[in-house]
Amino acid sequence: MLTPQQRLEWEHAQEAEKEYWYGCGIDDPDGSTRRQLLVDSESQKADFIFNQMVDHFGVDPAKDWSKLKVLDVGCGPTSLVARSKFGKTRAGVDPLAYPKWVYEDYKKHGFKVFLQPFEELDTTKKFDIIIFYNALQHFANLGEVARKCREVLAKGGKIYLSEYLEVPTNHAHIHYLESAKLDGLFEGAGFEVESVNKQVRLPGLVELPGGQPIGLYIASLRMLS
């Protein structure tokens, strides 16, 4: 349960995130160069940090997840799970509403979006693979996120995370993520955590000011009995 202050902070952050996407042109008409540049750049960033994760754990999503139910948490408008059709069934959850074209495209990829906070997702639904990439800084209460993971992860399933570390908060990103705290968060919720930190850089897209590498937290989680 969120406190009134947490709810207010989260709502303001969601408004800031919406202003970013719409301000960058996500609602521009079909064929808009501006919109396409936004989609291309965001897709490149998402693919880059996602691939850091699967490469580290030796996962081949197209093959290893082909018969599984996959959930992309905080999928946004450019989900790699949707674009690459990972999983026998695939879904995303994101409370922020995007323009109609986003959902029309997702439908073509057999990708269902739950337009609600992850923490409020129907707990009767179970997923074999749950993915977080560049998402955790958006949530109101990370403890609630960890608890919800236990509720919606299928028996024998896995969670994979790939998150920027130690990046200052802003109007849209309300958490300062640190590896030890993330390990402790999920271990405290009953997960076995395998994690690593690394410095990464994708010039012009994934980097700190001045072109410096950014820290990345990569983790695989499984539920303890």
Image (spheres, rainbow, N blue to C red):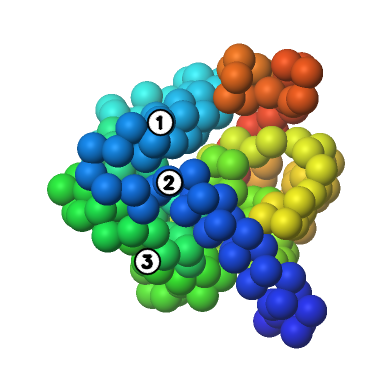
Task: Identify the mark at residue 37; answer none if there is no mark.
Answer: 1
Tell me which numbered mark, 1 or 3, is placed earlier along the sequence. 1
Q: Position of residue 94 (x, y in %)?
A: 46, 61
| Residue at point 50%, 20% (across, down) | 55
| Residue at point 82%, 43% (across, down) | 168
Q: Is residue 54 visible?
A: no
Q: CA distance from mark 2 to mark 1?
A: 9 Å
Residue sticking out furthest to the bottom: 4
The amino acid type found where label 1 is placed reads: Leu
Q: Position of residue 221 (x, y in %)?
A: 59, 44
Which element carries disc 2, helix, strand or loop?
loop
Check whether the beta carbons of the residues at disc 2 and disc 1 lie within 8 A of each other. yes
Task: Identify the mark at residue 25; answer none if there is no mark.
Answer: 2
- Which image quarter holds the C terminus? bottom right
Task: Identify the mark at residue 13; answer none if there is no mark.
Answer: none
Task: Identify the mark at residue 114; answer none if there is no mark.
Answer: 3
Q: Is residue 32 visible?
A: yes
Tell me which numbered mark, 2 or 3, is placed earlier along the sequence. 2
| Location of residue 142 with respect to 177 vertically, above or below | below
